[in-house]
Amino acid sequence: MAVIFKNLIEETLSKASKFIKNNRILVRFTSFALVSVAALVICIISCGITVGFNVKYEGKNIAVISSTSVFKEAKDTVLNNLADKNDNNIIAKPKFSLTVTSKDNLCCEENLVNAIINNTDEIFFSSSLSVNGQVVAYAEREELKNLVSTALCKYYVEGAENNATFVDEVVINDGYSLEENKKDSNQLKELVSGLKVKTVSTVTTESDVKFSTKTIYTSSKQRGYEEIQTKGEAGLKTETAVIETVNGEETAKTVIARKILKEPVQQVVVKGTAVAYSSATARAQAKSAGFIHPMNKGDIKAVSAYWGDGRNHKAMDFSGNVGVPIFAAKAGKVVSAGWDGNYGYAVVIDHGNGFKTRYAHASSLCVKTGETVTQGQQIAKLGNTGRSTGPHLHFEVIKNGTRVNPAPYIGY
Ligand SMILES: [Zn+2]
């Protein structure tokens, strides 16, 4: 039995071997075909080859799609999104042809929409510009956006934190529009630059802080002496403010921070009040009474002496130019400062110990009633007010209510 089986196998193998030997070409061809088919099947499975439709639009192959309905959807999308008036004929009829393609190659609706617009002369990718709900222009997207952002930056403050908006409600929408409705570049520029811009800028500015001046009067120096003891120096401050403008015109300003970077240095000036006296007696008298001359000697053009009761001119007159300074002959309290009839603008100072002084016919006054003044402090400017025949200072020394000769008190 086993022998029979063995003989059968050997016989079969021998027949097969003979067949292969006699039909070598046929066997090779069949093997090649089988391998090729297998490879193709593997390739189709692994590469995702599929059947699709080539879209020929306006003479150009613009896409391969899985079904013709993709084109219909894309066409509807374009027409529905076309911002301005349109008719359905604007999209040309495509030609479809069956093709084999990779699945990856199939065009989606979004890309097909772009391809249709790119290949339709009458339509362009637009942005619409709406002002207060009204579309005022269709324009190239980039052109419009560049113009708008340039317009918004126009009133920016350099070095500041800026934020700008249009005063009107301005909206830009991307879409597609008919080429014939596209706004001309110059008109678009004019339109956008005509929109009012509100800019809010946070600005920090640096500025000087002015220094103050303090005057020290000293009787140890002659009148006219003036020396800067401490030189004043300006300080430095910063101010941060939120400034609102409309087309560059300031409409509101809120200061949000102030900072002193450097305090100012007060200037200190020393001024002399001492007067050169005509005689030792006069100096002694003046010194004992503690008075100084009410004017700078250089300002005095002429002196009219005290005449007493005979001429009823119980004062001394010093003529000079209008505006030269008149000084307090002694420290005291201003008991009257203002218009005083024949005296014109006049000041009366009470020095205590029964002494008062009056300064009349001034052009203007530098002190107020009730004010305390130091010796040598400027109290008025020489003038020609009241009953006066020319610019002069009418100076009285009043001792216990009586107008006495001022000469001894001020060094004549
Ligand atoms: Zn007089």
Image (cartoon, helix red, strand yellow):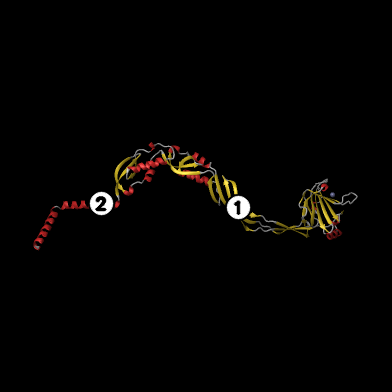
Name the residue nearer the viewer: 4 or 212.
Answer: 4
Q: Position of residue 37 (x, y in %)?
A: 23, 51
- Residue 118 visible in the current orientation: no
Q: Position of residue 124 (x, y in %)?
A: 42, 41
**Residue at point 71% right, 56% down?**
213
4 relative position to 172: left or right: left
- Residue 55 visible in the current orientation: yes
Name the residue nearer the viewer: 373 or 390.
Answer: 373
Q: Is mark 2 within 8 Å of ligand 1?
A: no
Quarter occupied by the C terminus: bottom right
Q: Residue furthest right?
A: 310
| Residue 5 figure quarter | bottom left
Helix or strand or loop: what does disc 2 sit on? helix
Q: Is mark 1 within 8 Å of ligand 1?
A: no
Which mark, residue 330?
A: none
Amino acid type assigned to the residue bearing label 2 in the image: Val
Amino acid type assigned to the residue bearing label 1 in the image: Val
The residue where tag 1 is placed is 255
The residue where tag 2 is placed is 41
Label 1 or label 2, whichever comes before in sequence order: 2
